[in-house]
Amino acid sequence: MCPHTSLKQQFLKKWIMGLQRCSFSKKNMSILERKKTIKLSADIAMASARNGTTRWSRALISNASKDGSDNRLVQQILGPDSNTPAATTTNKAGTRRASVCKKIVKRSHQIRRRRRKCVAAAPVKAVTSSISEHLVRKRRQVLKTLIPGGEFMDEICLIEETLDYITSLRVQVDVMRSVASACFSQS
Amino acid sequence: MENQFFLGAQGIPPPIPPLDFGQSLSSAMEIQASELNSSDYALQFESALSSMVSSPAASASNVSNDMFVFRELIGKLGSIGNSDDISPHTLMASSSSYINGNNSTNTSCYSTPLNSPKLNLPVMDVTVAEKLPGLGKSMGMDSSVADFSADPGFAERAAKFSCFGSRSFNGRTSQLGLNNNFNEISGYRSNPSSSNGKLPRVSSSPSLKAMASPIGNKSNPPLQDRSELANSQEESSITNGDPGLKATKAANSRKRKAVPKAKTNENSTSPSTNAAKATEQNKESNEKRCKSTESNGKQNGSVKTEEESKGNANTKPPEPPKDYIHVRARRGQATDSHSLAERVRREKISERMKLLQNIVPGCNKVTGKALMLDEIINYVQSLQRQVEFLSMKLASVNTRLDFNVDGLMPKDAFQSNNNSLTHQIFPMDSSASAIFGQNPAPHGGLSNGTMTPCLVDPLPPPFHQFTHTLPTYPTFCEGDLQTIVEMGFGQNQSREMGSQPENFQGSNQVADMKVEL
């Protein structure tokens, strides 16, 4: 995975930093708590590796910051990068507003298009196209739930964010897998 | 913010394969920029109008030129806002009478624009004519000054229009004519000093459509009605444009739809042959113009692909607008702006889906959006599940060993760190040896370069010292990382395991492993 080397290194470094900081706080954690901590720190590390250039990373960090219990953790992890949460919240607000307006316009467009189709298109064609549209829309909804911050993105943006998110997830999985294998190999 | 994403995305480090991702991002950025630029629909029409201004120059003085500009602007504005609410029919009816009444002047207007380089103008003239029937009736064509002053909102609207356009006009410097337009229009703004009193009324009313009917009932000349209507339409269009790019595009596409509609209506109502001919030609040119302005700068790539169809499509209008990038409708495809916009959007989406196909395994055989989205969803879900599972696995590692992180803090823990480092490097040997790099030194140096600065700053002071204690090992930071990982999981390995020479080898190997990652 040569192209991702620097990304992996970045992620690993940040993750370890985050782990360090979280682990200082508690002595006895249950396994689930630990898992949560590990996962969260990994996610935050992944998101911060993007430096706020992608929407999903910003959304992920802001979501984590919003959650009260995780907030401390996030603050610890992102200690030096204190500007990031603020930026993410403002970005989120702005994007939400814009995307809500976009959604309204989109919906109105869809309604118009449907009306036009009903009038203009042949009935068979309309049915099949509407079915396929329906399917695609369903899947798009699912994808939006998967990608952090995806509900506020339009289709084009969603696909790009998916691209980026997939590469980041891959990096995350690879690094975690290698670390886990290293841990387990010694025992 | 989308711009932000794209601009930032360009700065993503090269590790991501630049061939696919970077290209897509750059193209996405272009498209985004072009989308933003295409929203200044108004500007293109303004440029068209400006050239149209030059056309009736023979018939009138400078002021009348200005008046024509304004008329055209108003007409455009009226047509822009004329999408659904205000029926063009009333305007058509009045415009037909106007046209009939001022046939000679109209023909003069119509004939010259056809020769103008900017072809959209003939359309403008018609729209202007239809939108300002009262103008001709009340004022008469020769009293250009009166007309000019009678349309108080012209300059205001023109100025607003230019502002509206300039807001979305992000560096669209290729359209040279527009700059001239800006100057003209800004100059016009200062002109109607006589009608200052009316300007506030025109500009201050947000819901001018509602006002339109009461305004119509007033004793003001119908010109005022038109101006109010046009202004309201313009305002509504501007407010529509505010929420976002999509809204603007939607509004634009709606306006463009209205323009051909208006043309057809006018064709039906205007009996004069000259006007009919002109409108026919205008309509065609307008449609083409619509396409070009709509997709003006949306996708340069698509323009190139459609160059060949251009010749086929561009039969009747003599000259296409030269300083615009137009996306022509392909042969046998619908030419209205809606479908064009749809097509561009679909192309963008399919472009990105192709990129995704390369990334997501197993997507190559699948065709169709729904199935591909299915695959993508499955892949993302599986990756997320893997992350969960691995984090759980790593958490379980902790339970087996002491989560003794406080041991890291005190200084005397460094010795333990040292020893544990020697040991902890060891397990990496087994895994790293498989991927052991042939040249540890350069790799290590490389990784050292990348990692050391990062390590030094965020590490708490204890680790500072830790790194300083072993400066001679270039790959030490890698080993340090590994140590931290192990420490983080609270491993207190037995210290008797590590042997010194192996440590250094091990650290090299670790560095290599990291690099191999």
Image (cartoon, coloured by chain):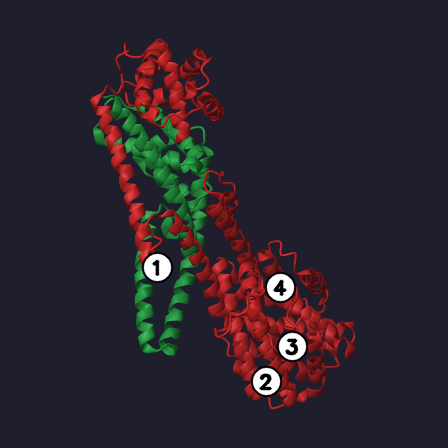
Chain colours: A green, B red
Residue assigned mark 2: B94
Q: Which mark is residue B122?
A: 3
- The Cα–Cα distance between marks 1 and 3, rounded to whole angstroms, is 46 Å
Residue under mark 3: which chain is it in? B
Q: Position of residue B359 (x, y in %)?
A: 38, 47
Quarter of the rendering containing residue B174: bottom right
Q: What residue type is disc 2 on?
A: Ser
Mark 1 or mark 3: name the one nearer the start of the chain. 3
Quarter of the rendering containing residue B299: bottom right
Could you confirm whether marks 3 and 4 are on the same chain?
yes
Q: Position of residue B272 (x, y in %)?
A: 63, 90
Q: What residue type is disc 3 on?
A: Pro
B113 shown above or below B463: below
Residue in the image at 42% along x and 66% along y? A109
Secondary structure at badge 4 equals loop
Residue assigned mark 4: B324
Q: Nearer the viewer, residue B441 or A141?
A: B441
Mark 2 or mark 4: name the one nearer the start of the chain. 2
Quarter of the rendering containing residue A123: bottom left
Mark 1 or mark 4: name the one nearer the start of the chain. 4
- Give yes or no for contact between labels 1 and 4 (Cβ–Cβ under 8 Å): no
Can residue B48 be seen? yes
